[in-house]
């Protein structure tokens, strides 16, 4: 699998370089106006890249199977962190959400750590209890309880996007492990009224759903962000207006360098640039699938599967939101959007995937 590992790594590097260029392009004017330094977000992104590279190469240096004995302690650590971040004067509030720890110049978001740790925990659980996965009491309910604890703590921040992602990762890994379809369908059906309640409980979520249905009914209000995103994508045409020439990043499109960076890519690089980016993600997932097919160790198999699901869903949701196919969710585009914790732990996940591939390449 050496060729696959090299191809995966090179595709990842191209995505990182692509993202770095677009972060500077999409944030330069905003950073100059607000931070008085056009390179502010670029410099911070490069700092996160260095930290992420450290985590990534660390995840490649040891036998990944050693993680199996640390699965429960890691889950316990994440739960503690998710509790602590909700405590006033410990967790940092930004834009009305208490999701971060302030560590000097860096904000750490424990919900981003929760995703890879959940994948490791579930991989350990399924590898050890393969025969119990189809059992409601021994396999399904214990997994649902763990997922439920994480979802409750994350939704309290509040963070509906990562809550839904945790739910989706868990269900996908359950099906991959052989859980009964009727169990999964039951929890999915039961989750629908809960999701509706969570949406109705917050006025801003209701506005997002309404604006999703038709953003042009209120283009200056609830539909502003989505309508500006569609203007950006439409303005790009096939070839784009040119790198750095976006008009929507000039304080029209909010979160241009984070959640809606795909829209700026579509505007500046056009339909062609957007398709190239999607193809790159497709190549990344395809190489990951090839690694998955050659992974015989159950623990490694489930980790690899979970990582691929995590990245795939984030890409689909971010792109879907940008083009107006899905309601607005605060999920960044992996390796492309600006964002410290998400970038660092996604890079660590790629390191773990390469570790699994190397272990089976050596036949160890």
Image (cartoon, rainbow, N blue to C red):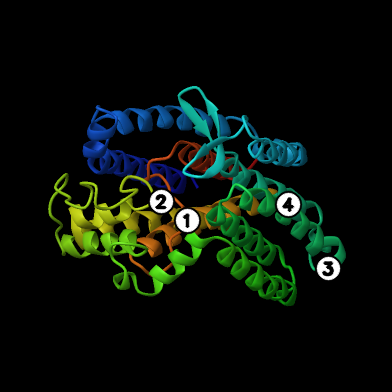
Q: Residue 149 bears which disc, if any?
A: 4
Residue 38 percent coordinates (x, y): 23, 31
Residue 255 percent coordinates (x, y): 34, 48
Chain-order first, disc 3 or disc 1: 3
Chain-order first, disc 4 or disc 1: 4
Q: Residue 333 bears which disc, if any?
A: 2
Cβ atoms under marks 2 and 1 closer than 8 Å: yes
How far separated are the C-alphas under marks 4 and 1?
A: 21 Å
SS under mark 1 = helix
Question: Label 4: few (<14), some or many (≥20) within 10 Å?
Answer: few
How far separated are the C-alphas under marks 2 and 1?
A: 6 Å
Chain-order first, disc 2 or disc 4: 4
Chain-order first, disc 4 or disc 3: 3
SS under mark 3 = helix
How far separated are the C-alphas under marks 2 and 4?
A: 26 Å
Q: Nearer the viewer, mark 4 or mark 1?
A: 4
For the C terminus, give its image quadrant. top right
The image shows residue 24, relative to residue 292, as above or below, that is above
Q: Is residue 59 left or right of residue 77?
A: left
How far separated are the C-alphas under marks 3 and 1?
A: 29 Å
Q: Nearer the viewer, residue 180 or 192?
A: 192
Report the residue marked by disc 1: 314
Q: Residue at x 76, y 36 (%)?
A: 73
SS under mark 2 = loop
Q: Residue at x 64, y 50 (%)?
A: 156
How far separated are the C-alphas under marks 2 and 3?
A: 35 Å
Q: Is residue 192 left or right of residue 37?
A: right
């Amino acid at each position: 699998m050496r060729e696959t590992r090299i191809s995966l790594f090179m595709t990842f590097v191209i995505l990182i370089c692509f993202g770095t260029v677009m972060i500077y392009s999409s944030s330069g004017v905003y950073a100059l106006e607000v931070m008085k330094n056009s390179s502010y977000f670029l410099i911070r992104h490069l700092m996160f890249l260095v930290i992420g590279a450290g985590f990534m190469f660390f995840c490649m240096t040891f036998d990944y199977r050693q993680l199996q004995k640390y699965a429960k302690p890691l889950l316990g650590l994440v739960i503690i962190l998710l509790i602590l971040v909700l405590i006033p004067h410990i967790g940092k509030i930004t834009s009305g959400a208490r999701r971060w720890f302030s560590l000097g110049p860096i904000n750490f978001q424990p919900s981003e750590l929760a995703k890879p740790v959940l994948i490791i925990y579930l991989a350990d659980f399924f590898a050890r209890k393969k025969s119990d996965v189809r059992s409601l009491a021994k396999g399904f309910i214990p997994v649902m309880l763990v997922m439920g604890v994480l979802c409750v703590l994350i939704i309290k921040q509040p963070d509906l996007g990562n809550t839904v992602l945790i739910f989706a990762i868990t269900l996908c890994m359950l099906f991959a492990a052989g859980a009964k379809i009727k169990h999964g369908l039951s929890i999915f059906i039961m989750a629908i009224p809960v999701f509706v309640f969570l949406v109705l409980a917050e006025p801003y979520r209701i506005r997002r759903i309404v604006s999703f249905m038709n953003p042009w009914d209120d283009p200056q209000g609830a539909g502003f962000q989505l309508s500006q995103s569609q203007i950006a994508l439409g303005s790009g045409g096939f070839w784009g207006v040119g790198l750095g020439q976006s008009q929507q990043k000039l304080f029209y499109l909010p979160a241009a360098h984070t959640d809606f960076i795909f829209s700026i890519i579509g505007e500046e690089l056009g339909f062609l640039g957007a398709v190239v980016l999607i193809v790159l993600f497709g190549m990344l997932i395809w190489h990951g699938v090839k690694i998955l097919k050659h992974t015989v160790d159950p623990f490694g198999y489930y980790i690899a599967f979970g990582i691929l699901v995590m990245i795939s869903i984030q890409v689909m949701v971010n792109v879907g939101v940008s083009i107006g196919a899905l309601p607005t969710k605060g999920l960044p585009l992996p390796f492309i959007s600006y964002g410290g914790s998400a970038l660092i732990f996604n890079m660590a996940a790629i390191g773990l995937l390469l570790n699994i591939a190397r272990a089976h390449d050596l036949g160890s």
